[in-house]
Image (cartoon, grey):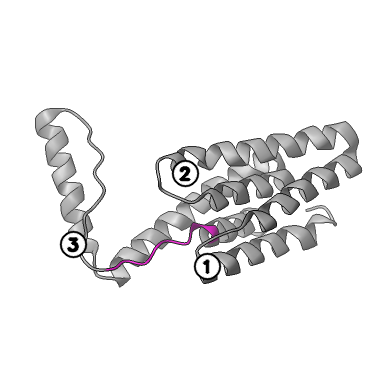
Amino acid sequence: MEHGLKFFLPALLLSASILDLMYSKIPNILNYPFMAGGVLHHAYMRGMEGFVFSLEGLGLGIALLLFFYLAGGMGAGDVKLMGAIGSFLGPAGVFKAFLISAVIGGFYAVLLIIIFGKSREYMNKIVSSFKYFFYVRRVEVQSPQVTGAVPRMRYGVAIAIGTALSIFAF
C-alpha cells in the first residue's frame, strides 16, 4: 500500500466502524472528505492517471452496493463508505474488498441469527420459499417475519473488516 494510504484508510475504517456501532450511521462528514482525499492523493501522486484510477474506484464502490441500498438492505452511509474505500484502492482493490466484505457480512448475519435464537424462524421462511418456488415456479422474495428483537446489522463493520482483510491478508 502506498505510504500516504497507510494512515488514511485505516483511520477511515476505524472511524466508520466506531460510528456505525455507536449510532448505526456512517455520516457524510466522514465519507465525503475521505472520498475527496483519496481522489486528491492519487491525482497528486500520479497525475491524471491517478485521478481517473481513484474516480473509477469511487464509482465502482458506490455501484457495487447501490442495489442493496435501493432494495432497503443497507444504509446510504455504507454505500458511500465503499465509495470512499474505492477512491483509495481503485477499481480492482474495491472489488476485492467488496467480495471479502460480503463474505464477512454473511457470517455476521448468520451469527446474529444464531445468537438471538431466530434461526428456526428464518429456516422455516427459507423452506417455505423453496416450496413456493417448487409448486408455483415463481420466485417471491419475502422478508422473514420474526418475533422479538434482532439487532440491526452494522454493515459498516463488515465493510471495514473485509477491506482490512483484502489489503493485509489476501
Is residue 142 found left or right of 48 in the rendered image?
A: left
Q: Name which residue type carries label 1.
A: Tyr
Where disc 1 sits, the SS reads helix
Residue 49, position in %: x, y? 84, 32
Q: Residue at x 54, y 39 (%)?
A: 64
Crowd around label 2: few <14 · some 14–19 · many ≥20 (10 Å):
some
Residue 95, position in %: x, y? 60, 41
**Image mark count:** 3
- Seen in the picture, residue 138 relative to 12 is either above or below; the reply is above
- Seen in the picture, residue 162 relative to 21 is either above or below; the reply is above
Where disc 2 sits, the SS reads helix
Q: Mark number for residue 23? A: 1
Crowd around label 1: few <14 · some 14–19 · many ≥20 (10 Å):
few
Tags 1 and 2 in contact by the CB under 8 Å rule?
Answer: no
> Which range is magenta?
149-156
Residue 129, position in %: x, y? 18, 42
Q: Residue at x 54, y 62 (%)?
A: 157
- Seen in the picture, residue 60 relative to 150 is either above or below; the reply is above
Q: Residue at x 13, y 37 (%)?
A: 132
C-alpha distance separating marks 3 and 2 = 27 Å
* Residue 152 drawn in magenta: yes
Q: Name which residue type carries label 3.
A: Arg
Tags 1 and 3 in contact by the CB under 8 Å rule?
Answer: no
- Residue sitting farthest toward the top: 137
C-alpha distance separating marks 1 and 3 = 29 Å
C-alpha distance separating marks 1 and 2 = 18 Å
Which badge, 1 or 3, comes first in the chain's sequence?
1
Residue picked out by circle 3: 120
Residue picked out by circle 2: 69
